[in-house]
Amino acid sequence: MSEPSKPLICLGIEGTAHTVGVGIVDSDGRVLANMRSEYIPGKGGIHPREAAEHHATVAPRLVGDALKTAKLAASDVHVVSFSMGPGLGPCLRVVATAARALSSLLGKPLVGVNHCLAHIEIGRRVMNVADPLTLYVSGGNTIVAAFDCGRYRVFGETLDIAVGNMLDAFGRDAGIPHPGGPKIEKLASMGKKFISLPYTVKGMDLSFSGLLTATSAILKSGKYSIEDVCYSLQEVAFSMLAEVTERALAHTEKVEVLLTGGVAANKRLQQMISIISNEHGASFYVVPMEYAGDNGAMIAWTGLMQFRAGRTIRVEESNVRPKWRLDEVDVSWRDCSGGSQ
């Protein structure tokens, strides 16, 4: 009697913005390691070159730590994946170089992963969700998307800056240390007076730049407390997100709603999306923060699915794609019913 085959193992490297992460997963869906390190931006926000230098410095150590945590030798890895885009060019190039080197050294296949897609796929895995409408909100992206026969379709997105970027930028204007989101949430919970602010939804898309400018100006005027300003900022921004998410939910008639990305940690946003989900008879899921923010495990898991679907790339084809859209990716490992093949 033959022994059962061992699960496939994928090592994934994430590095699209301020976080560099290394994750290791197997084909049974187990996360064996998920290490990360964050570059802390200064007053002007993320400096791509400085973030890239941080990633280059810590990535080798993270790979070693991940293998040690997973109790594996490098030779045990079957495939190497990396975040190929979208993201900041210098950061993407660092992790691409690391992944190419590791793939070449070990003689293992290489897979380039779309960062936005990975946020959705790790959410589906850890929450055991089959076919959700996803609201993905982070420092770099704001997207409402759902799968439909071969690709994820974007139903709404930001036209300028992402909601997480907007919150962080306001935090810097207000003298709130990085990361601004959690501290803004705490201040907002103490606010009592709602201040009228720009609410910009254009069809199914959103714009946050005007909201940022107006909110910063109101705070600098000194007419309102920072608690009331943060409260109003959250209410307007999250109401905009809830509006486009609800419209997409009504259109797609999905029975599951998934909230992911770093901003998914906000309890007020969770409450709003939970309410609209319930009103439409859909189950609501929030990805745990270990996997909602940028992490290597999501790149490893998505890379493993792509590998099993035959989606590897040669080193000479592995140029990074800083503006790679979610809806440009062929999702060949999912069938038209929404499930995985």
Image: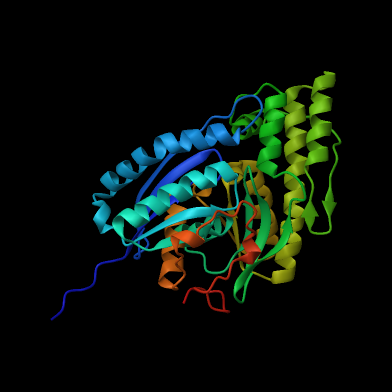
Give coordinates of residue 315: x percent, y percent: 44, 59
Residue sitting farthest toward the left: 1
* Viewer can see residue 194: no
In this rendering, the answer to whether 101 lies above or below 5 is above
Q: Nearer the viewer, residue 182 or 87?
A: 87
Give coordinates of residue 274: x percent, y percent: 64, 54
Give coordinates of residue 278: x percent, y percent: 66, 60
Among the 4 quarters of the image, the one containing residue 308:
bottom left
In this rendering, the answer to whether 126 lies above or below 196 is below
Give coordinates of residue 154: x percent, y percent: 69, 63
In this rendering, the answer to whether 252 lies above or below 293 is below
Is 276 left, or right, of 56 in this rendering? right
Q: Looking at the rendering, in which quadrant would you find the N terminus?
A: bottom left
In this rendering, the answer to whether 26 lies above or below 339 is above
What residue appears at the point 59 percent right and 45 percent down from the top-left corner? 89
Is 323 left, or right, of 23 in this rendering? right
Residue sitting farthest toward the top: 222
What residue appears at the point 35 percent right and 56 percent down from the top-left corner? 104
* Viewer can see residue 164: yes
Residue sitting farthest toward the bottom: 1
Colour treatment of the image: rainbow
Number of labelled discs?
0
Q: Nearer the viewer, residue 68 or 92?
A: 92
